[in-house]
Image (cartoon, rainbow, N blue to C red):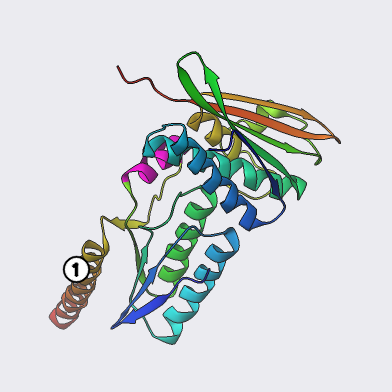
Amino acid sequence: MAAELSLAIAADVDVVQARLHGRDLAAGAGFSTGDQTVIAAAISEIARNILMYAKRGEITLRVVPNGDRHGVEVIARDRGPGISDIARAMQDGYSTSGGLGLGLPGARRLMDEFEVTSVVGQGTTVTMKKWRRVTP
Amino acid sequence: MEVPILKQGHYLIASIQSALTDADLSELREALIERVGRFRSRGVIVDVTALDVMDSFAVRTLRDIAHMARLRGAKTVIVGIQLDVALAMVQLGLTLKGVATALDLEEGLAFLDHHAAARVDDKRAVGRINRGR
């Protein structure tokens, strides 16, 4: 199990590769198949956002420890136009690309931790984590 | 990755075999809508059993397929949405409102047969009303 994986996102096949790798990583970290799918879906949304808004970027996947819990961390970085109004971009149905406007808010609902930092003209970074539920 | 489309009587069956890119999904939409006209199909089944995730693009494309096929006179039913996939869809906030779904291919075929039979009944009913006048 690779501890960290960096993937270039520049075409729609890269979106599929990123979510398949994310699923593998989550499986290796002991996530249930349900959570693997949830993580893959979140990666798919933010990877597509990179393509739509910035044309290219990078996704880094890694397993992060936190005490006795394992988590999966996904970092999506691009040097695209940035987001001028993050609060609005996080609203359901808001899109400047003609999409469904569910990418960012949808991914946030799927993951346990979610953070967007963006500087207009410099790019956007989305950091999101999912923690494995501890089975008693 | 091209999605094979089978023609079975008045129905078209598209069986997705693996994870699809956005371009693959768009191609599937074009191919299905073209074939509805070419084969005068009355029903379309899209089997998504092997699809790894249903994200916003996949859902939008399936919705477009169903709406475009209806405009061309065919009923669409999406079959095979897996439990995990359904769970993630709901959390993402994605719905297939207005699009028929069925558990699997068998149920999907039964649904279309039922729909076709109901359509024939409707026509007969209209015919009776007209004759009654």
Q: Residue shown at 38%/39% (left/top)? A: A33
Query: Picture coordinates of residue B89 (x, y %)?
Result: 42, 42
Q: Is residue A74 left or right of residue B133?
A: right
Q: Report which residue position mark 1 lands on.
A: B114
- Residue furthest to the front in view is A1
Tell me the quarter of the picture where residue B10 sits.
Answer: bottom left
- Prevalent SS, magenta region: helix
Can residue A102 be seen from the camera position used here? Answer: no
Q: Is residue B10 magenta?
A: no
Instruction: Pick whichever, B96 or B53, lies toward us.
Output: B53
Instruction: Pick whichever, A21 or B41, lies toward us.
Output: A21
Q: Is residue B43 left or right of residue A20?
A: left
Q: Which quadrant is the C terminus of chain B positioned in?
A: bottom left
- Labels in figure, total: 1
Q: Residue shown at 19%/67% (left/top)? A: B110
- Residue furthest to the right in view is A121
Q: Is residue B64 left or right of residue B118?
A: right
Query: Picture coordinates of residue B62 (x, y %)?
Result: 46, 59
Amino acid type, label 1: His
Span of residues in magenta: B83-93
Q: Residue shown at 50%/30% (left/top)? A: A109
